[in-house]
Image (cartoon, rainbow, N blue to C red):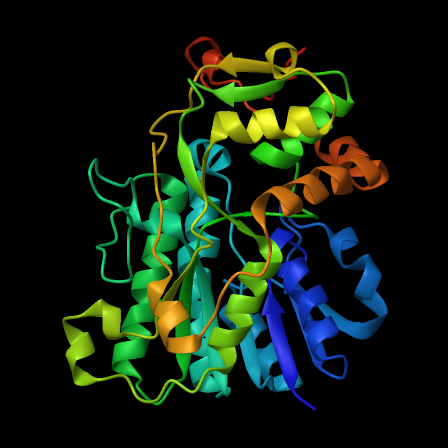
Amino acid sequence: MAVYLVTGAAGFIGANYVHFLLEREPEAQVVAVDYIGFAGNLANLDPVIDRITFEKADIADLEVMEALYRRHRPDYVVNFAAESHNDRAILGPSAFMRSNALGAQVMAECSRLVPVRSHVHVSTIEVYGELPAGQKWFTERSPLNAKTPYSAAKAAGDQMVRAYMATYPEMNIRMTHCANNFGPYQLPEKLIPLGVTNVLRGRKIPVYGDGLQSRDWLHVLDHCDAVHQVLHADLGPIPKEAATDPGLLPIFDISARHEVTNIDIARFVVHELGLDPAEWIEHIEDRPNHDRRYVINPEKLERELGWRPSRQFDTEMAATVRWYAANTGWWEQILADKGELGFDWSRVALEGQARPVSTQ
């Protein structure tokens, strides 16, 4: 019976992976690790809580994590744990550096000290930065060019994981970069759940700037399926040529090849709720240093592992909006605990920091 150690398991993608894993492998032993930071929500695991072992732990604490490894002896490790909100990273970069960079190194070190069958470090499209005009997409060969505190911290973690790949070739460590995810259990500070929860409370959806920032969108369960395939793939040794060609490293970019602007996402949400976008969307001041466009090419994942997304964007987006509408108790408790989750950057000059916004 395989033992899986999943970090960030009470977050959006991590919780969905735990659900996915137990549906795919009902007999698996799952050790779900999370330190329940700002984005962690133990309620995300309620449907499976009696089928997992939950460990509250900080992945950046080597002593704690090594002891946890030795106690549970995982076969497979998937590191989803990360601070992931660009707005909060602008206001407090240090927490992001700890989780996203030091945490990535500690997890890799634990998998070196207590060897596992395979280890997947889950990263983001944003480490590549902003897509230049005239370029179709990023690939695994693209240079890391992060420009925000969040994505720079993730890129630092990526660099450390790449160093482990090269320095400790006996380790079976892999990495993924994913497009923007959507689906259930996402903290309502991100565009889609923020939009739904605002409208259901009689508030407009705040859209940064002109709303034409363009993103590559992927349903969270398609992402989970890709990560699981990477985790279990028989990849063989890393070739020597990978020293100068990162495309030969065990790194896979995950995308459904579906690009949508932020304003069109907001319009979709309002339409799905049966309302007029002209009356329920408000443009607000853009956040500093906002990436305009990024898209990744999943060709390597498709070619080498045969992965394909199985979920259609419009159908799953509609289902996602309905999920938040049907699970008001879930997000109302989050708002009661954490307060307003939107940001108003127009207040920075006046108050020295962005404040939560309640757009009426």
- Rendered location of residue 28, percent (x, y): 71, 82
Horizontal relation, residue 309 to residue 189: left or right: left
21 vs 155, nearest the viewer:
21
201 vs 33, nearest the viewer:
201
* Image: 300 above or below 314: below
Horizontal relation, residue 333 to residue 66: left or right: right
Q: What is the quadrant of the C terminus in the image?
A: top right
Question: In which quadrant of the rendered view does residue 198 lie?
Answer: top right
**Residue 186 seen by the camera:** no
- Rendered location of residue 210, percent (x, y): 42, 18
Residue found at x 53% / y 61%: 309
86 vs 316, nearest the viewer:
316
Residue found at x 43% / y 64%: 104
* Image: 279 above or below 155: above
Horizontal relation, residue 250 to residue 23: left or right: left
- Rendered location of residue 332, percent (x, y): 80, 33
